Structures are given as structure tokens and as C-alpha cells.
Image: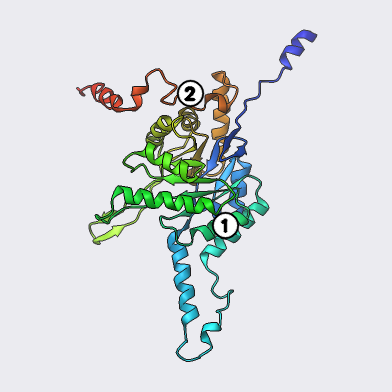
Amino acid sequence: MAKLLSIHSEEEPMIDLSTTYLGLKLKNPLVASASPLSKKVEQVQQLEQAGVAAVVMYSLFEEQIIHESLELDHYLARGTESFAEALTHLPDAGTYSLLPDRYVKNVETLKKYVHVPIIGSLNGVSKGGWTRYARLIQDAGADALELNLYYIPTDSSLTAQQIEDAQVELVASVKSALRIPLAVKLSPFYTSLPHFAKRLAAAGADGLVLFNRFYQPDFDINELNIAHTLELSSSSELRLPLRWIAMLYGQVQLDFALTSGVHSATDVLKAMMAGARVSMLASELLHNGADSASAILNDIQTWMTLHDYASIQQMQGSMSQKAVAEPAAFERANYMKVLSSFRDLP
């Protein structure tokens, strides 16, 4: 009887969900990507309690920094024709408290009340005031910074080389101002993504976040207006970043974060096998609440137990292009196989 009790008292082997991203040790690979959920401390605390391992703050946009400069210039110059001493009179800082400074204060607040790593987020394409705000976000306590290169080229005189050169210069400029790690969030629309990724690594990037979601405008044909609608992602969007991370893994010495289309444990596991260090999710959290993170983590542990995985790190990169038996499946051969597998409907 004692022997039977001993057998039944044995604990299940612990599953190690930990990973590292940008040098940060995380308890699991679930990261909340930039979204409105990070605007309130209470919501971030809910994410933390649900098991999310790190949080990327909502983005500070380049346009907001430019607006700050223009607005400050306006108030500094106002009334100079009337008073000779007007240029030495500064406006009341409390009256003209602007969004970028509130963003920095929000970083400080989150670091005070939340224990998981907080990653700041800057969204822009030109150098401007980035280095200053990168430093301010760092000094406010951010554990890392995500630079979102969201750019839609509309000038036909700009070449791809010019655009990429400017973005590499921006990354190098921001990185030179920082002591904390820097991740760069990209769109998939580059002529040679592997080459550009290597240039970003050489410029100082520590990680890549793949991919940005472009919110496409629509037409309202009755009102003859541009309709701006927000559609949450679905798991079908996972395939594009999954493919590119699987191809880049081992080619470029950067940490990869997969974003867009992460809604389930299966999505997270696929991301890990492709070579991602973390999976970022926002739509799932916005649609189903913070508790959906707990459900995903439970499902991950159940799957790993059933398939004899001891750790997340054990599977990272196991389905990358360099690891699979059929590397061509990620390239042009996949396109031909998909088409040839089609069967006419009756």
C-alpha cells in the first residue's frame, strides 16, 4: 500500500514555459502587443494576473511629437508684436501639458504598479525628436523599446533604397541614444526582407517584430467618404509572419517576435516552432478579455505534456527552414504544391 501511495504522490513533471526576449527573462512567451489596453494601470494589472509575461505600451506617434513642437512654437511666439519681452515669457507648463509627456508619465506609473517588463513603443519614420523621447521613455523605467516603422510610400520619386537607408539611419540614431534593448516592428513589404533585417541588426537592433498590420481604408459609396474601420485579426493572418520567421531564423542573429493572428495555444506553439522568442497578441485580448491569456497558457501546458515537451526553448526553431526535412516548402515550391493540390469541386 505504501508503494502505491508513493507512486500516486509523484508530481507531474514541471513544464518550463520560460523564454528570453531582448535579453529579458520572461516566465512564458505571451506578450501583450501595443493596444489601448495599456492605457490604464488596472487593465495592465489584469493582464499580469492572467499570466501575460510582458506588455508593449500603446504607441507614441511621430505626428504627436511634431504636434508638440508646433504647438509649443505657437505659444512661445504668440503676442511678440505687442511686448518686447514676450519671447522670454514661457507659457504655463500645466496649461499646455501635451500627449508625449503624458506618455512618459504613464511609463513611470506602470513601472510603479506592475511587475512584468514594460516595453515602450514609438511609431514613426523620420529622426525628428525620436532620440529625445527614446531617452525619456528609457529613463522613465521602460525595460525595452519597440520602434514601429509604419510607413506607406506615396512619392514615386523615392526609391526603395532611399526608404530603407532612411529607416536604417533612424534605427541607428535611436539605438545610439539607448542603454535598453531595441526591437524594430516591420511591415512585410520590403524587396529583400532578409537583407534588410541584416542591415537593421548591423544598425543595432536587438529584435524584430513581424509583422505590422496595415489598417486599409475603405470607401463609403453612399456618403462618398473614406471609411476608417478597425477589424480585429484572425488566426489566418498568422501564416505570413510564421513563414518569414521560419526563414529568417538562423540567418539573422536577432530575437523574433511574432504578431498578427495570435489567438490560441496552437498559434503560439507554431510561432515558437518557427523560431520566435515570443508571441504577441492584442485582438484576442481586446475581444475576449485578459482571462483568454490564462486559457491559452493552460492549453499550451496541456499540449506540451501530451507531446512530451519539457520546455518552450526545446521547440523554438524546430520547424524553421534550416531545421525541417523539406526547406523548399517555405519557398516557391510551396506555391506550386498548393496549386497542384487543388481539386475541382463537383
Q: Position of residue 269 (x, y in %)?
A: 49, 29
Q: Residues within 10 Å of mark 1 (few under 14, many from 20)?
A: some
- Mark drawn on residue 318: 2
Residue 194 lies left or right of residue 284; in this view the side is: left
Q: Quadrant of residue 10?
A: top right
Q: Give the quarter of the figure containing the N terminus.
A: top right
Residue 70 vs 262, above or below: the answer is below
CA distance separating discs 1 and 2: 37 Å
At horizontal 60% and vertical 56% (from top left) the residue drawn is 107
Q: Position of residue 207 (x, y in %)?
A: 50, 41
User: Which comes sooner in the sequence, label 1 or label 2?
Assistant: 1
Q: Residues within 10 Å of mark 2 (few under 14, many from 20)?
A: some
Q: Position of residue 346 (x, y in %)?
A: 19, 22
Residue 215 visible in this rendered orientation of the protein: no
At horizontal 38% and vertical 36% (from top left) the residue drawn is 194
At horizontal 67% and vertical 20% (from top left) the residue drawn is 12
Q: Amino acid at mark 2?
A: Ser
Residue 316 lies left or right of residue 246; in this view the side is: right
Residue 342 lies left or right of residue 21; in this view the side is: left
State which mark lies toward you, 1 or 2.
1
Q: Which residue in the protein does label 1 denote? A: 135
Secondary structure state at the residue bearing disc 2: loop
Secondary structure state at the residue bearing disc 1: helix
